[in-house]
Amino acid sequence: KLCIPFGLPTVAAISFVAGPENPMVSLFFSFFCFSEIMSQELHKWSHMTKKETPAIVNTLQGLGITIGRVPHAQHHMAPYDGNYCIVSGLCNEALDNSGFFRWMEHRIYEINGVESNAMKLDPELRAKTLRGEYRLTQ
């Protein structure tokens, strides 16, 4: 559904502006738009039941190539403090353990004053994040 309003007109406009002498610009943005659209589709499928998704999606989720329903559901459960990767989930453990997402949430809070859901729900996590202690404890 996204490729009609987003992907095709965007790629067509960029290709027109870049001109025929710059095919690599068109190729780059074609790949970028395809990747963006697919990331949203993979995320959408992680919210759907097995009966609602194509068989290939169920296979990819079962193999761990794309994010499955159960691993992604952890992202939507309090305290909302991890599992933010929506395409495959392969990086969740490393990024959660490194504190990357806490660090990003802290930067966003410094820029616009908006707290993440995790910070709103967990005063201890909020205090640790604002002190620069980003790693999650297991």
Image (tube, rainbow, N blue to C red):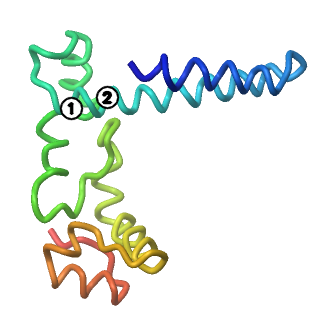
Q: Secondary structure at mark 2?
A: helix
Please give the name of the residue rendered at 36% of the width and 64% of the height, measured from the top-left corner. Answer: 101
Q: Would you call the spot at circle 2 few (<14 residues within 10 Å), some (14-19), or many (20 or more)?
A: some
Q: Secondary structure at mark 1?
A: loop
The vertical placement of 26 against 101, above or below, is: above
**The label number, if any, that marks residue 46 in the structure image:** 1
**Percent coordinates x, y for residue 38 in the rendering:** 41, 26
In the image, is 53 to the left or to the right of 130? Answer: left
In the image, is 73 to the left or to the right of 131? Answer: left
In the image, is 9 to the left or to the right of 74? Answer: right
The vertical placement of 78 against 57, above or below, is: below
**Percent coordinates x, y for residue 53 in the rendering:** 19, 16
Q: Would you call the spot at circle 1 few (<14 residues within 10 Å), some (14-19), or many (20 or more)?
A: many
Q: Tell me the kind of residue under disc 2.
A: Leu
Please give the name of the residue rendered at 75% of the width and 21% of the height, measured from the top-left corner. Answer: 15
Q: Quadrant of the N terminus?
A: top left
Comparing 121 with 59, the one in front is 121
Marks 1 and 2, how far apart at CA = 6 Å
Q: Quadrant of the C terminus?
A: bottom left
Marks 1 & 2, CB-CB < 8 Å contact: yes
Q: State the image quarter where residue 103 is shown.
A: bottom left
Q: State the image quarter where residue 127 is shown.
A: bottom left
Residue named by callout 2? 42
Q: State the image quarter where residue 66 is shown.
A: top left
Q: Tell me the kind of residue under disc 1.
A: Ser
Please give the name of the residue rendered at 21% of the width and 64% of the height, measured from the top-left corner. Answer: 81
**Percent coordinates x, y for residue 49 in the rendering:** 10, 23
Comparing 74 with 65, the one in front is 74
The vertical placement of 57 against 28, above or below, is: above
